[in-house]
């Protein structure tokens, strides 16, 4: 039973992360600068209370995924404009 609950929680966290990435990407597409958000996510504490190490790693991974999505959109845009992706 504990394993099932753990899998449920893991799935919920994955869903929340995907929603966050989608929302952040949509804000970028609307012209919001992602840099302040990314910097705040990479800070190691919240109001003086340190993040748990797994949380820090997850925040880094989310920022990396958001950066990869941005780079992919830029490549697609370049390709559509020039026919080249380099």
Image (cartoon, rainbow, N blue to C red):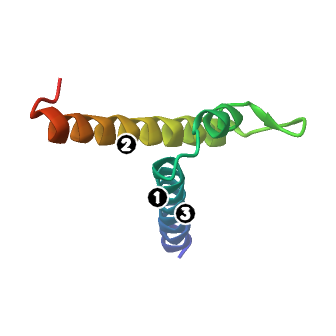
The numbered dot on residue 69 is 2
Q: Residue at 50%, 47% (x, y): give it.
A: 28
Q: Secondary structure at mark 1?
A: helix
Q: Which residue appears farthest toward the right when viewing the image? A: 48
Q: How many numbered discs?
A: 3
Give the number of the mark in front: 2 or 3.
2
Give the number of the mark in front: 3 or 1.
1
Q: CA distance from mark 1 to mark 2?
A: 10 Å
| Image quarter of the C terminus | top left
- Packing grade of label 1 (10 A; few <14, some 14-19, many >=20) is some
Where residue 63 sits in the image (x, y, percent)? 52, 38
Q: Secondary structure at mark 3?
A: helix
Mark 3 or mark 1, which has the lower sequence index? 3
Q: Which residue appears farthest toward the top when viewing the image? A: 86
- Packing grade of label 3 (10 A; few <14, some 14-19, many >=20) is few
In this rendered view, identify the residue nearer to me: 58 or 63. 63
Where residue 45 sits in the image (x, y, percent)? 79, 35
Where residue 44 sits in the image (x, y, percent)? 74, 30
Q: Residue at 48%, 56% (x, y): give it.
A: 26
Q: Which residue is mark 3?
A: 16
Q: Which residue is mark 1?
A: 22
In this rendered view, identify the residue nearer to me: 55 or 59. 59
Q: In screen coordinates, is 65 left or right of 23? A: left
Please determine whether, in this image, residue 4 is positioned above or below residue 27: below
Where residue 84 sits in the image (x, y, percent)? 11, 29
Residues marked 2 and 3 touching at CB (< 8 Å): no
Q: Secondary structure at mark 2?
A: helix
Q: Quadrant of residue 74?
A: top left
């Amino acid at each position: 039973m504990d394993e099932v609950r753990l899998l449920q929680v893991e799935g919920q966290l994955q869903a929340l992360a995907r929603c966050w990435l989608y929302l952040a990407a949509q804000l970028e597409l609307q012209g919001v600068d992602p840099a302040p958000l990314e910097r705040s996510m990479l800070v190691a504490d919240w109001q003086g209370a340190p993040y748990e190490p797994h949380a820090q790693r997850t925040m880094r991974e989310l920022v990396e995924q958001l950066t990869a999505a941005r780079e992919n959109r830029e490549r697609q845009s370049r390709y559509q404009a020039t026919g080249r992706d380099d």
